[in-house]
Image (spheres, helix red, strand yellow):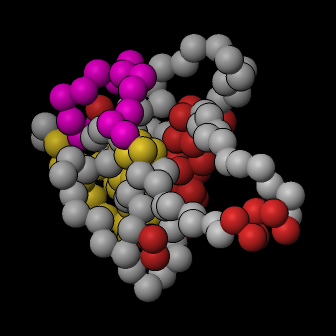
Amino acid sequence: MPNLYPASSYSRRSPHSDDLFNFQVFNVNAEPKYLRQYDLEGFSSQSIDLVRFCQMIAKIAVVYGTHYFGFDTFNPTVVDFVRTDFPPGNPATGHFANVGCLWRRKRLATESLHEIEVGEMRWQGKTMAAVRVQLFASYGMPSYYVTIGE
């Protein structure tokens, strides 16, 4: 799973940043006999489309956050981003404006496979509705903090 820098909506990073901090992986150990059984010759790394990944995390966050906070209780900030069709292979910016990880946050495995938590984030005098989305929490994967509205 990608480990992102804090989003520009709650940090000093540019909203046009297009880089990530690193990846956190879960090592799958496969014994050679199982590889032979399924005629697997090896493994390879897959590319990750960070724009679509951020859209997926933002979509989960805005749907859950809208249900929790109520439809007319905040001004949405990620709806247009979630609905935008970014053609594959074309450069895009702004996908880290509202989706990111908190810096130096400890990640511990939990009993739940996935976790969602709602709350507020305050940054530079603004209070924003926010949702924490943690996919594969039981494996200690990163939490993504999404500011969904003001």
41 versus 18 height, above or below:
below
- Quick one: which residue is furthest to the left in this view? 125
Q: Which residue is at a point 38% across and 19% down the rendered structure image?
A: 16
Q: Is residue 139 left or right of residue 123?
A: right
> Which residue occupies 86% across, 58% down?
39
Q: Position of residue 72 (x, y in %)?
A: 48, 55
- Where does residue 102 sit, x and y in percent of width and height? 25, 50
Residue shown at 30%/72% (left/top)?
108
Does residue 57 appear to the left or right of 133 in the view shown?
right
Locate residue 83 relative to residue 92 in the image: left or right: right
Foreground: 37 or 108?
37
Residue range highlighted in magenta: 9-22
Q: Which secondary structure is most common in the magenta stretch?
A: loop
Is the C terminus in the top left, top right, bottom left or bottom right quadrant? top left
Location of residue 110 in the rendering, given as x and y in whole percent from the top left corner: 39, 80
Q: Position of residue 81 (x, y in %)?
A: 56, 33
| Closer to us: 146 or 126 | 146
Q: Which quadrant of the structure image shows residue 31?
A: bottom right
Name the residue at 29% across, 65% down.
Answer: 107
Quadrant location of residue 13?
top left
**Residue found farthest to the bottom:** 111
Q: Which of the pair 129/115 is nearer the observer? A: 115
